[in-house]
Amino acid sequence: MIEAKKLAYAYPHATAKAIKHIDFSIEKGEVFGFLGPSGSGKSTTQKILYKLLQGYEGSIKIDNKEVSSWEKALYEKIGVCFELPNHYLKLSALENLQFFGAFYSQSHKPLDLLRMVGLEKDANKRVSEFSKGMKMRLNFIRSFMHKPDILFLDEPTSGLDPVNARIVKDIIMDLKAQGKTIFVTTHQMHDADEICDRVAFIVEGEIMAMDRPQNLKLQHSQRVVEVLMKGENTAHQFSLDNLGNNLEFLTLIKQNEIASMHSKEASLDDIFIKVTGKTLA
Amino acid sequence: MIKIITLIISDLKNILRDKTLLTFLTTPVTMVLFVRYFVPYIGAKYPVMEAYYPYIVMFGSVQAAIMFGFITAFMILEEKDENVLQVIRILPITPSFFLLYRLSFATFLSCVGAFAMIQSNGLISLPLGSALFLSFQLGMTAPFITLVVATFAKNKIEGMAFFKGVDLLLLLPMLSFLIPNALKYFFGVIPVFWAYQLFDNVLKGEDLTFTFLAGIAVYFMVFGKLFMEFRRRVFDR
């Protein structure tokens, strides 16, 4: 559905490239995450895909058609949730959705969308009176109001409290279940782990790793289990290999009361730091 | 058509809910009332003013027309400030469609404002046909202002400074009436000069063809350049 080959991009007057000959592909119905720190090239890649940036090198295709060849019909096919709120502040939430919805050939009912993210009571309130989180939720629902096949979500949970972030992630999973292709950029590793089928780590315009979160975790985890017994301060460590036949382990858990027991599975944060040498601050 | 109606409705809501834009919107009405009722009152006290009535009406017509240019420019600046232009760029409409709508909206209202001043000033009377030609040419000041302010002002604060600067610039060609020879055509690079000249032609009962067409030509040359600049600096940025 989306395929990039040797994609490179330099901003006008910049000496270095913001994107350095990257390759990736996203299948239909897949949730693909671009993870990286600020300025790593995540949003730049998305902006190339929805044609806010032009003059790229290499190839990037949507539905087997080069992005540069797409005309305005592209915007019926894709939906974009920007990182920062962008609404008519003097119009209400409902008026904003009605306004933007009028430009598409099909559209969800605005009130149904507002209900999905708990904004139905604020439908007639001017957006200038909204909090950042409310504006972000409005950004989010506007991105798929015209029923696009492909969604670009730039930091979709940014500025949201945990309850609303949960709602947004659930809607993303619903959209995936409907067969939508979703390209997410985020530096929230936990969210990426939860919603993405595959993730790519991008740093300084280069993809450093790309795989399913589960595969990355398996590749980079220590195959050990750590057991802490009640009354003890130091944990016991056992290899996961042949653990069921490890007499020392079996005796320990039979004869003592366990305080905690964890496998040493790496988090995406740990793996990102290990692979890229960078943090996500 | 639905797209145009949607744009008009939301533009009107945005104007009516903004104190600054609402002030701009009511200014032409205030000016018509001022010229119609206050100027004759002053004229009665100081009869010397009567000789300047045509110029007062000229000035009033330009001022009535340009307000709609500022309204449109400020709407675009607000869209720039709030990053709404970014969303408009990913709508299935072309930048030309959006800009053409906005400029037509400004031109139409501007023509109406100028026509109201020309027809209701109570100081001088002009034939209906001439008034329509004049209103059309004065209406062209609105897209000119919209493009200048929306392209070169970075935000609404700068927009206000541009508002004052452009307003002064548009008064400058009135000085051409103090220049008796062809040197006055140096002011021709400022498009509104041709509207002033057209006004003068109407008052003197002269043929309007050359001035009208020259004005339209200058406006369209300036629009072409400004449109490209607008796309480069604002829309495609």
Image (spheres, coloured by chain):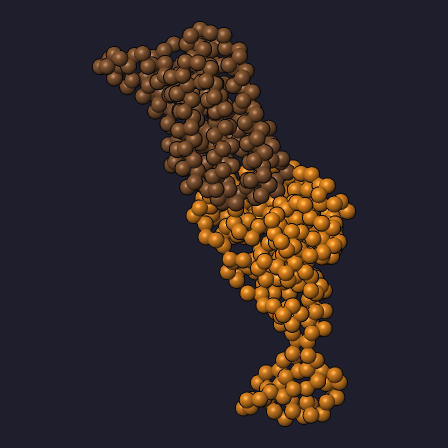
- Determine the residue positioned at 62% across, 82% down: A261
- Determine the residue positioned at 48% across, 42% down: B154
- Determine the residue positioned at 52% across, 61% down: A163
Asked which quadrant contains residue B173, the reply is top left
Residue A10: x percent and y percent?
65, 51
Residue A11: x percent and y percent?
62, 50
Task: Give chain A's shade.
Answer: orange
Nearest the camera: B219 or B140?
Answer: B219
Nearest the camera: B185 or A246?
Answer: B185
Residue A105: x percent and y percent?
65, 37
- Determine the residue positioned at 56% across, 53% down: A83
Nearest the camera: B16 or B31?
Answer: B31
Furthest toward the left, the residue is B45
- In this view, A243 is above or below B129: below
Residue A18 appears in view:
no
Residue B228: x percent and y percent?
59, 34
Furthest toward the right, the residue is A64
